[in-house]
Image (tube, rainbow, N blue to C red):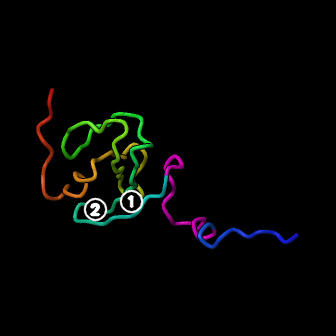
Amino acid sequence: MPRRHRPARARRSAHAGEPRPLAGAGWARRESGPDGNWLVRTVPGTQTVKTYRCPGCDHEIRPGTPHVVAWPADENGSAADRRHWHGGCWNARLHRWPTRRRW
């Protein structure tokens, strides 16, 4: 019986230099902007179980809410630098500032 080969898509993902998956929930894409280079991953609402605080609007991202996770793409970026953003806040991050933090 002949052996099955992996599809070309699976072989390509094993190449070095590509973004690594975060907790097996998907691949990050690279985004560049005036604020630097970022790795960004979209998180569907079905995979969110914790509450996060969006740095763009300073409001909570509740469990079940789709959002994005972004962290610096340079060699200094690490898991500790990841931030969870509302999708709209991430897209508008260069045009507005966070709201005043509530104490």
Identify residue type, mark 1.
Asp
Give the percent coordinates (x, y) of residue 47: 45, 43
Magenta stretch holds residue 13: yes
- Please tell me whether residue 50 is drawn above or below residue 83 in the rendered image: above
Left or right of residue 8: residue 88: left
Left or right of residue 29: residue 16: right
- Please tell me whether residue 102 is drawn above or below residue 1 in the rendered image: above
When asked about the image quadrant of residue 55, the answer is top left
- Residue occupied by mark 1: 74
Report the residue that reaches farthest toward the top: 103
Q: Are marks 2 and 1 in contact (CB under 8 Å)?
A: yes
Picture mark count = 2
- Residue occupied by mark 2: 36
Helix, strand or loop for disc 2: strand
Q: Residue shown at 18%/43% (left/top)?
A: 57
Identify residue type, mark 2.
Gly
Magenta stretch holds residue 5: no
Helix, strand or loop for disc 1: loop
Give me the C-alpha separation between circle 2 and circle 1: 9 Å
Q: Quadrant of the N terminus?
A: bottom right
Left or right of residue 97: residue 75: right
Answer with mark 2 or mark 1, whichever residue precedes in sequence: 2
Q: Residue shown at 11%/37% (left/top)?
A: 100
Closer to the camera in the image, 3 or 13: 3
Give the percent coordinates (x, y) of residue 67: 33, 48
Q: Residue shown at 34%/59% (left/top)?
A: 38
Give the percent coordinates (x, y) of residue 2: 84, 72
Q: In which quarter of the image is the C terminus?
A: top left
> Quick one: label 2, few (<14), some, or many (20+) residues within 10 Å?
few
Give the extent of the magenta segment.
11-25
Closer to the camera in the image, 72 or 66: 66
